[in-house]
Image (spheres, grey):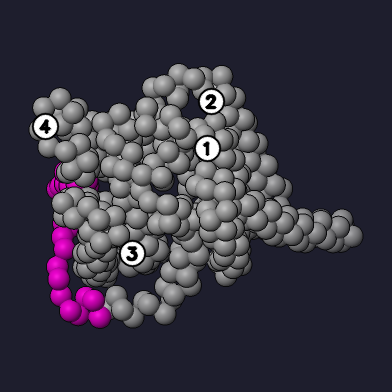
Amino acid sequence: MSIRHKMSRRSGAVAPLSKPRSRWANIVVRTPRSARLLIVFFGEAGQSGFHLLLNIALLRLLSAEGYGVFAVTFILASVGITYMQALVGTPIGVILPRHRRAGAMVWQATFSCASAALALVTGLMIFASVSLWLERPEFAPAAALFAAGWFLRGFARASLFANGSLWRAGLSDAAFVMSGLILGTLAILFSPLDPLLDAFVVLFISHVMGIVAAVAGTRFKIAFRMRLLVRYSRLWPSLAWSVAGVTSANLQAQGQMLLVAALAGPAAYAPIAASMIVFAPLRTLGAALFNLLQPAFASAVSTRNGRRIWKLLFGSSVMIAVSGLFLGAATYVFFRPIKEFLLKPQFAGEPIALLMVLAWLIVTLAQLYAAPRALMLGAHAFKLVALINLVSATFGLAFVAALLIMVGTAWSLLGVVFSELITFVSLWVAASILLRKFRRKSTSRIVGAHDVA
């Protein structure tokens, strides 16, 4: 047995759940971390870009009601993804690295079984929502398959991250995007079916192709066994606050939009969703920065490095602010072509300029508190973040409902702006207090060192 093998066994490192590495795979693993992170970033950007193109195509092909049905279904499926991350994505990333090969494989099977069960529940909920709430039962099966497929692909990516297989995660993202682009183009050119049905089918098949790319050549498998579900159920006490935090975040981020769709209907919600699409690039940048900042903040908090925390907080926020101002200015300059190309004639009677301004405020504020939110989560202030989300969501929902009744759909977005503003101020105040505490402790250590000298 080689010295390296002995050291890896003693360190408790997790052997990857795959076949022995080829010569090319060994070269890939030695790639610098920055390059591997870029691959993941471009994977995220590719997915967001594909979703943007899909939404633009559907805006041109569907009626206002049809696009509203798609937008609401997409929001509901994205909410399912947040619960996937809380219930199986984050736990597998924490638990797998602590076990050696045999233990890791058991936990891999446990989370795979749980994710399959949760994906089934997600699909059934989407089926019921599309059939009963949106009253489009003919699209319910395809929508349910799309949501379940997205859930499973999200878990497959989380599993790859837990095993350190970033390149394979990037390959999965590329397979999803390329399949979606090719199948979407073929559907637009040749399919005789309803474009909404085509969209759900294309998304489902694309997610399946992403899953195949993620698990091909590995020992990844799903086994429905009661003992695996019992093992998973033992984690529920530790997952309770995670679920509470996700629920409060969803209420704050999506609850008000879903309330507008519920009270005004999918057709009335369609121009709001269309206005939000324009600012999707800023959401992509904010999500990428959040994913990169959270581990960086966690490391800085563990060492109580106040100076590094300040640099990360200030630098990332300035980047978001500049990007938001640039995107807002570009939207103002090119408002007419955006309105004519992106927004359909049936939206002509809607106050598109007002919707654009409010959508810009909502998206920009939401991304401007991404850095302090990542800091608070890195400092394990989960309860405080959940409480802030819950308070802002409560005020926001009440404000949205009142404005819907009094002044109509478009102005009801002021309630969402108000909710985002509460979250923005609260998180920045909490982050400032935390940063001040770290700086005070750092200063006292420096003074103490000088006294000793």
Image location (x, y in percent) of residue 318: 65, 36
Residue carrying label 1 = 355
Write down the quadrant of residue 329 in the picture. top right
Amino acid bearing label 1? Leu
Q: What is the C-alpha distance between the residues marked 2 and 3?
A: 39 Å
Q: Position of residue 40 (x, y in %)?
A: 38, 40
Mark 3 or mark 1, which has the lower sequence index? 3
| Amino acid type, label 2 | Thr
The front one of 156 and 18 is 156
Crowd tier of the residue under label 1, counting other residues whose Cα lies within 10 Å: few below 14, some 14–19, many 20 or above: many
Residue 351 locus on image (x, y percent): 52, 34
Per the image, is 227 magenta?
A: yes
Residue type indicated by callout 4: Ser
Residue 191 circle label: 4
**Three-letter amino acid code of the residue under disc 3:** Val
Residue 360 falls left or right of residue 37: right
